[in-house]
Image (tube, rainbow, N blue to C red):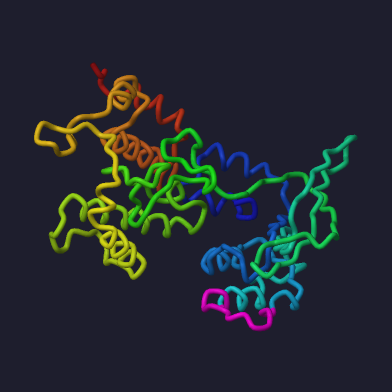
Amino acid sequence: MLLTPPSVLAKYDVPQHVLEVLERSAVEHVSIVGRRGPFQAAFTTKELREMMNLPDAAMEPLDPQILKAPEGVQVTRQQSRTIQLLQKGSKNKPGTTKKTWSLDFFRSPTGLTTPKSPGEKSRLTLAHTALDSASRAVPTGESSTLETDLVITSLGHRADPSAPWYDPGLGHLRTIGGGRVVDALGRRVRNVYASGWAAMGARGVLASTMMDAYAVADTILRDCFPGEEGAQTTPMGEADAEAERIQEAAGAGAEAESVDVLPRAKDGNVDLETVPQEVEVGWREGRVTDFEDWKAVDREEVRRGEVLGKERERMVWEEAHEYLASVRPRRA
């Protein structure tokens, strides 16, 4: 985003107020700092290729030594593709563009010194690291500093600590196969599911979390309609099938070790028509949105985008909240 021309971003769904800030941006170089090396990098080949093809920026070449696989390490197909791209470098060669970027591997930020007088830059202290036998980044004792005007942290995702079934050790909700939520005692919370980063932590890109959401939807279908063939939204992958086998192996024992949090109807089944009181209150007060609200916001974003000649103009939550309050009927 910081290196892409705003004229390119304007065609997509980047909000207008963000584009206005980027138009004023004076950023000329971006250093991407990573605690470990290129073989442990979490970005995808597609993401890296997009960086390599930035129209107005060039990547600073990497030391060829760090692109060599450690002795005795089996390189995956994904890693091999990543290394090949890094060896090839960016489409624009260094020195041919005003803007540049670099991948600073084996560096771990340890401190930030702010400017003491006008004209000075902040100084980011970086501990040099190496991998131990468990592939964890450990300091070597050496360090260096990096002058900078801006620091953006990207230290992983933590789910809301106040959320029910949050595990502080994991940094996200506790789940078992298929996104089924479990409590602190390891009991399955019946009819409660989680997906994406809230369920598995900060890993994968948008497509990964989307596929995870599909897989959790399949789990819900199989739980609601046991024994029915074809109750799934996507073909079941090997990992999903294995999770299902583990869940089925637990069998009645797992079902006995479960708890209910949703209201039940007279027949003993979960009453799916009854909305928890706190959700209903939030809905009446406009703090909780439903599918009709989402569709209204979607239509309005597309309409605003058409006026500006782009696919949509996204609203921030406060703006969407104000819009919904102005168009939806009063909730009794």
Residue 9 x %, y %: 53, 51
Instruction: Tell me if residue 26 comes above or below residue 39 in the rendering.
Output: above
Residue at horizontal 31 percent and vertical 39 percent from the top: 299
Q: Which residues are magenta?
A: 68-80
Whether residue 296 is in magenta: the answer is no
Q: Which quadrant holds the C terminus?
A: top left
| Majority secondary structure in the magenta region | loop
Whether residue 69 is in magenta: the answer is yes
Position of residue 305 in the picture relative to residue 109 (left or right): left
Instruction: Tell me if residue 1 comes above or below residue 306 in the rendering.
Output: below
Position of residue 7 in the picture relative to residue 133 (left or right): left
Q: Nearer the viewer, residue 250 or 40?
A: 250
Corner quadrant of residue 270: top left
Q: Nearer the viewer, residue 215 or 312?
A: 215
In the image as oriented, which residue stretches furthest toward the right?
117
In the image as oriented, which residue stretches furthest toward the left?
267
Residue 76 x %, y %: 53, 78
Residue at horizontal 24 percent and vertical 59 percent from the top: 233
Residue at horizontal 65 percent and vertical 77 percent from the top: 88
Residue 97 x %, y %: 72, 63
Residue at horizontal 25 percent and vertical 49 percent from the top: 255
Corner quadrant of residue 131: bottom right
Residue 189 x %, y %: 31, 43
